[in-house]
Amino acid sequence: MSYEIQKLFGAVQARLQADLQGGTLISHQGEKGNASEESWRKLLDDYLPRRFQVSKAFVVDSNGDISQQIDLVIYDRQYSILIFEQNGVLHVPAESVYAVFEVKQDLSLENIRYAGDKIASVRRLHRTSAPIVSNIGTNVGRPPYRIPGGILATRSSWTPALDTSLARALQGLSPEEQVDLGCAVQHGAFAASWDSVLKDVEVVGPDHALVWFFLRLIETLQKLGTAPAIDVGAYRRKVEEPRKLSL
């Protein structure tokens, strides 16, 4: 990396760290967790391209199933429909989800497993994919992609921070629970590659952890393309089956 690029990303790293700093100054554990979630949400919402929205939410599907509540759901901002808010609680259709993240204070075995369980509750949901009609014809619906999932933390509880303990924690996850990306701001960031099992884990230290994580996240989102079109009829049929009038 050239010196000027290093300086540029160093400045971005400092700004990102400053954006997250507020949550670490709160002593009450519950309030600290809420502040951390909001800091990460605002950071992602501010810096991701405008077609993405970031919110705490439940994810629902057309079969009536629902995920656990997810700290940060990255979902489609431009074309998403059927976003429901009830008493301040957001419900996002599974088809609109690009990625999901859990926010914890520490990166640890327990929290990796916890994040994996939350991620799995989203990946198990059914996703429709409706044909898209345009002026040049009708395109069949695209197959649903695998939803990336991750964990965001302030620090790592392991020593060394991102080493064999992280790899072993990831290896213990089932295919539905696989954690793809993570960042522990004070100690580094990681990206895991999977087949049915863990292939490899890339890690970086704290100096550029936030920037590296963020760029890796954008790369991941770019590869997904656009979220599939929702088969609205599948959701409508869950509301009430209509009766036909006699003619």
Image: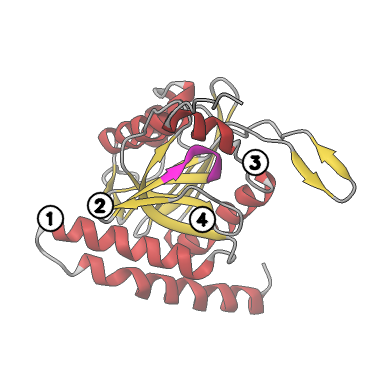
Which residues make up the magenta segment? 92-97
Mark 1 and mark 2: span between their CA atoms? 9 Å
The location of residue 90, given as percent across then percent down, is 35, 51
Q: At x 42% / y 28%, what residue is drawn?
A: 177
Looking at the image, which residue sits at the far right? 136
Q: Is residue 81 left or right of residue 111?
A: right
Disc on the earlier residue, 4 or 3: 4
Disc 3 marks which residue?
228
Q: Secondary structure at mark 3?
A: loop
The location of residue 128, given as percent across then percent down, is 59, 31
Q: Nearer the viewer, residue 64 or 109?
A: 64
Cβ atoms under marks 1 and 2 closer than 8 Å? yes
Cβ atoms under marks 2 and 4 closer than 8 Å? no
Disc 4 marks which residue?
213
Disc 1 marks which residue?
29
Mark 1 and mark 4: span between their CA atoms? 25 Å
Disc on the earlier residue, 2 or 4: 2
Q: Secondary structure at mark 1?
A: helix
Which amino acid type corresponds to the residue marked 4 in the rendered image?
Phe
Disc on the earlier residue, 3 or 2: 2
Which amino acid type corresponds to the residue marked 3 in the rendered image?
Pro
Q: Residues within 10 Å of mark 4 (few under 14, many from 20)?
A: many
Q: Nearer the viewer, residue 238 or 14?
A: 238
Disc on the earlier residue, 1 or 4: 1
Mark 3 and mark 1: span between their CA atoms? 39 Å
| Picture disc at residue 105 | 2
Q: Nearer the viewer, residue 217 or 164?
A: 217
Mark 2 and mark 4: span between their CA atoms? 17 Å
